Amino acid sequence: MKTARIIVGKSGVSGRGVFAGKDFKRGEIICRFTGTVVSIEDMKRIYKRGKPKVSCDAFQIGARKYLLIDEPFVLINHSCEPNTAFKGERTLVARKAIKKDDELFYDYSTTEWTARDYTEYDHRLWPMNCRCGARNCRGLITCFPLLPKATQKKYLEGAIKPYIRANMRLPEPEHHCAVCESRLAAFRKRAAAR
């Protein structure tokens, strides 16, 4: 009898989540995301047709290319201390040994590189507030360039999406989107006032 590699269940973080259906060794392939490839223009049209969460359900696979993720993959939650990462464009691998029934998480920031000219259609939803509960929770999920430098280095030494690795070679001013920068500044200001 073949065992399911991943199982959907009630998340310990938010709504439904995806859990390991078996033990995984560090570096082992867990699954490959599937879905429909769309452009930024497609995302804008979908948003205008009344689907405000389209940006939350899309997964960046290139500078202007996204994957509208199929279930169950779209149900994998974020963590600032993820147990999985991406190898290549869509292949999810174990960052460490994962036990059967452990919830699977990846860091959403490792899949996002928002360009400075990114459109305004989804600024209400991105960057996202984070309530992952991890010991080092950042409180806000932003694009990869706005991660702390030590966190970027840790991810770049392991599995990271090819277009993000290539973009890290761009000059620093091209690294950040104005939306993420302004939301991060406001978030830090509120945190300092507490």
Image (tube, helix red, strand yellow):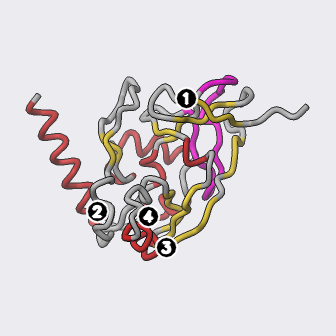
Looking at the image, which residue is at 63% across and 45% down?
Answer: 72
Which amino acid type corresponds to the residue marked 3 in the rendered image? Ser
Which circle marks residue 39 in the picture? 3
First along the sequence among labels 3 and 2: 3
First along the sequence among labels 4 and 2: 4
Q: Quadrant of the C terminus?
A: top left
Task: Judge depth for marks 2 and 1 and give the one in front.
Answer: 1
Which amino acid type corresponds to the residue marked 1 in the rendered image? Lys
Which circle marks residue 10 in the picture? 1
* Distance of label 4 from label 2 (alpha carbons): 13 Å
* Distance of label 2 from label 1 (alpha carbons): 34 Å
Task: Judge depth for marks 1 and 3 and give the one in front.
Answer: 1
* Distance of label 4 from label 1 (alpha carbons): 36 Å
First along the sequence among labels 4 and 3: 3
Q: Are circles 4 and 2 on residues that touch, CB within 8 Å? A: no
Which circle marks residue 167 in the picture? 4
Residue 186 location (% of width, % of height)? 15, 46
Q: Which region shows up in magenta? A: 83-102
Residue 55 vs 87, above or below: the answer is below
Residue 150 location (% of width, % of height)? 38, 39
